[in-house]
Image (cartoon, coloured by chain):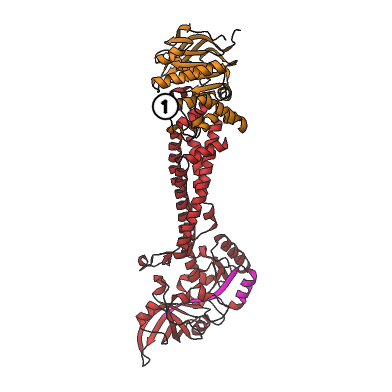
Chain colours: A red, B orange
Amino acid sequence: MIKFLIKGLWRDKSRSRLPIIVVTIGVTLTVLMHAYITGFMGDTIEMNARFTNGHIKVMSAAYAENMDQMPVDLALMNVEELITSLRDGYPETEWAARIKFGGLIDAPDSRGETRSQGPAIGFGIDLLSSQSRETQRLNLEKALRQGKMPSGPGEILLSDAFATKLKVAPGDTVTLIGSSMNGSMTMYNFIVAGTISFGVEIMDRGTIIADISDVRMALDMPDAAGEILGFMNTGFYDNTKALEIAGDFNRKYLTDTDEYDPVMKSLSQQGNMGQYVAMSEIWSMYVSLIFIFAMSLVLWNAGLLGGLRRYGEVGIRLAMGEEKGHVYRSMIWESVIIGLVGSVLGTALGIFFAWLIQTYGINISGMMRGASVMLPDTIRARISPPDFYIGFIPGLISTVLGTMLSGIGIYKRQTARLFKELEA
Amino acid sequence: MENKSIISISRLIKRFPMGKDEFTALRDISLTFTEGEFAGLIGPSGSGKTTLLNIIGSLDVPTEGEALVLGRSIGKLTTREAARLRKENIGFIFQSYNLLAVHTVYENVEFPLLLLNIPSAGRHKMVMDALEWVGLTDKVRSKPPQLSGGQCQRVAIARAMVKKPSLVLADEPTANLDADNSHHILQTMETLNRELKTTFIFATHDDKVISYLHRKIFLLDGRVDKDEIIRSNKR
């Protein structure tokens, strides 16, 4: 009997191949859209993590309160000791001290007088030590437009647009005019080693990147850092894990009495990133739900039409003594086969297309000019474990559900009308 | 030797709801059919012949009275028991053949045997025998769309006969056939009736069919108007 049903299924294109194609297309779109949304949201989250938020960040409680102002006077002290304890306590995370600061960059002429000036946001990061991964994390070598990477003390990188505006080139000297940790005015000379462009409008306006040792010297911050950023070894932000680590750290270190106590915040606890993380999860869910709903409607109709088209066949089977339950179950099994085949094919195709977008990306830099938020200029999909099963929800469940609902007609059908119906 | 009764209908009434009222399709029908009959229910549209055929075929139940088919009271059967009675004992032939278009002639005829879970080897012999009865052994691999109307109806007869049922019910089996094919089909059925002792009951108003019947039961407005035995089926 099974062989008989499979033969019928295989030979009747509108009963097998057409529904399989419909399911395959639907599942492909579902998987692709899920990977695309995950990639887009994930890229933005990762970019913010790498440049500003980390997956988790340690600051002084007072610094955390005023984080937007980059208050170097509220920086953490005894940073080396704190990093050592962080490495011991949370080995699944990589730690990097940074100093974020604001100031004025002055470009002198040949006589040493101001030729041009501009406000800058500075990043003091570990550029020079061999074990540091900060250069890769910020993708600096790829972002290099002119000159070279800093190779010794006193060398910095300027954003390319900023260097053009100041009319400075690699090898030129610029002066940072800012405020030290103690509140006094500070001036410190740097040599421009190279210029960089991140392709992110907000970062390319006026950025200076220097080695953290130089920044400590310039701002008088020995063994201090504004922030210690933590990056999960998996390479991806895990909100649950980040909240768990932050909670554990704060229980150990944070008191209500000292505003300089270190406090740890997950990426989602910083600024508007919490909303963004929640939004990315909700968007992914909405996209999946929309596709599940859309697929259900499509397959409902496909199932209904298929059922109507097979009205005669079902009628003759009932008349010949096949039980209603048997006819119904055989139709359900058919839809399970169609749903499975369509879901497997659709998942494979969806992952293939997602892989293409993950590998090559879609360049949207043209749309990002003037953007005031940090968004990637190339959107990439990201293939994640749910992509391997999410398509089965609409592909298999909706198909079977559609058939189950359309097949209820089998039970409602009156055998007394079969002769008349089969004469039609 | 007297043939045994296989259908016994007693004071059968069938009513259908029609809006707030009821329509009485069959009124006080009492009939008996014996094994090996070649009988027909004859009457104009609306006379109740298909309704009676439905009840005999366990596709419908009487409102009042009793219909005993092969010893089972149709009105008391569950849906499952009714399906089993049809599957094991009754063959159906329809006006529009109702073959499964994507399956071959062989597979169409084989289908009732699959429902009965008959093993493969026995099944093959039964299918080939049935196709031989209707003269279609050369068409086993053909599919219904490749056949003429007459050939399709012969496949339908083979499908109805393959399990050697006690009873075959045929509703206007020649309505879609020309005269030559109609006679060919009717001759085939008459031969099978004679050789296999299968009871055939037709619902028809076609003169060609009527001319072959051994018993003619005329229905009018849901009542038996006349019951003529043309030729006895005593053998």
Question: Helix, strand, or loop for circle 1?
Answer: helix
Residue in the foreground of this view, choosing between A119 and B47: B47
Identity of the residue drawn at 48% across and 86% down = A154
The amino acid beneath tag 1 is: Gly
Residue in the foreground of this view, choosing between A301 and B159: B159
Residue in the foreground of this view, choosing between A187 and B48: B48
Q: Which residue is labeled 1 in the image?
A: B149
Residue B67 x, y percent position in the rendering: 54, 14
Residue B207, placed above or below residue A354: above
Badge 1 density bin: few <14, some 14–19, many ≥20, Cα 10 Å: some
Identity of the residue drawn at 57% across and 63% down = A242
On whether residue A90 falls in the magenta region, the answer is: yes
Give the residues drawn in magenta, as a range.
A81-103
Residue A308 x, y percent position in the rendering: 44, 34
Residue, far bottom: A111
Q: Quadrant of residue B111?
A: top right
Residue A149, placed above or below residue B51: below
User: In the rendered view of the protein, which quadrant contains the C terminus of chain A?
Assistant: top left
